Image (tube, rainbow, N blue to C red):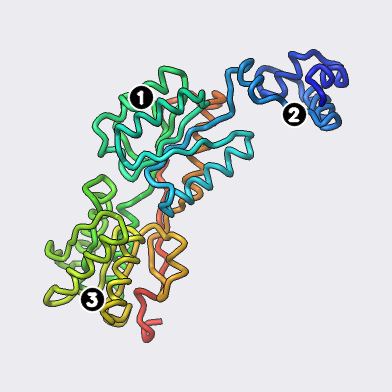
Amino acid sequence: MSSIYQVAEMAGVSVATVSRVINERGYVSEKTRLKVQEAINILHYTPNQAAQSLTTSSTKLIGLLVPDINNPVFLEQSKGINDYLKEKGYILMYAESGEDDEEMSNMVRRFLSNRVDGMILCSRDFTQFGDMDAIIEPALKNNVHVVLNGYVDSKFEIDRVGFDNVRGAYLATEHLLKMGHSSIALIAGTDSTISEERYRGYREAHIDNHVSLNPALVVKGDFRQHSGYEAMLKILQMNPRPTAVFAMNDVMAIGAMMALEDHKVSVPDEIAVAGFDDIIWCSLIRPRLTSVVQPKYEIGKKLAEFLLSRMNESYSGPGRHEIFGSRLAVRQSTVKSEQQ
């Protein structure tokens, strides 16, 4: 097995220079860097990760905390994060918080005990936690940068990546209104900023299209499939029955469509259904589900990009907040055959 000393000897440089090239720290001329890289390739030299971490204070580990790793939205975001970090030589350490502030705090401390270089924290809604600053402060005190995938009011200069929930819900509701539906039921999520924003889009689309809102058409869910199913059963009991349903996420929309299938109600001929997030299932179920497209993979990549730019000090300014735009993917669940 080759050593760092052999690499230095072949390249005609010092061991310290080889270390700077490997760890991308300190100045090395391009000519010298190429010589060192060539020696590494010829000798098939692989740096010892443990030894590297001791000498550079870097483990190349990034902690990723998500509420539910099985949720399709977080799965796709995680892929974007992992692909970006892997290309830069980092390894992801996954953990689940279950949307519990105590568990999130515990996992942040566990990440720190594993000496991660940075953290990406994901949640459906950070505002549900009592004090996010108290959760992230231990990391920042240890000079470990943190980025978040949503809105949080913080005293720290935290980078955040979000999505235009208001616009997304507006597009879905406006589409249903333009398809001739004036009675659109809403399957809402848990009390959260995301739910508030998506309700705002639903409400504003009604106002802008001069259609009156009926509070009785809003049925509470919890973003899970079963709650979508149960909400749809309540909607089916309404008199008069709505002709369209907008669910605040695709998982609830699919639950609603299952209830309609069980009760032999045709989609979209009797009730049109639209969802939110554009998870992979939208194109697999029949009829295919109309949904607001959230660029989950791209959001993940941006989170990773923000984090690394803090870690390598290419950016040290105020907290950044990037909001991704939305569009609607119109599919069979909202378009009758004669409207196609």
Q: Which corner quadrant holds the C terminus?
A: bottom left
Decide which of 244, 225 is in the foreground and name it. Answer: 225
Mark 3–mark 1 distance (CA, rounded to whole Å): 47 Å
The nearer-to-camera label among 1 and 2 is 2
Q: Cβ–Cβ below 8 Å for labels 2 and 3?
A: no
Report the residue at 61% width, 21% height from top: 53
Question: Would you name the residue on which mark 1 appears?
Answer: 156
* Amino acid at dot 2: Thr
| Image quadrant where residue 40 sits | top right
How many numbered marks appear? 3
Question: Would you name the residue on which mark 3 appears?
Answer: 243
Report the residue at 47% width, 47% height from top: 77
Point out which mark residue 46 bears.
2
Q: Does label 1 or label 2 sit earlier along the sequence?
A: 2
Left or right placement of residue 91 versus residue 11 in this view? left
Decide which of 142, 167 is in the foreground and name it. Answer: 142
**Other residues around mark 3 within 10 Å, as few (<14) / some (14–19) / many (≥20):** many
**Other residues around mark 1 within 10 Å, as few (<14) / some (14–19) / many (≥20):** few
Left or right placement of residue 86 versus residue 39 in this view? left
Whole-percent x, y for residue 84 in the image: 58, 41
The nearer-to-camera label among 2 and 3 is 2
Q: Which corner quadrant holds the N terminus?
A: top right
Mark 1–mark 2 distance (CA, rounded to whole Å): 38 Å
* Amino acid at dot 3: Thr
Report the residue at 59% width, 28% height from top: 60
Q: Is residue 265 above or below residue 87?
A: below
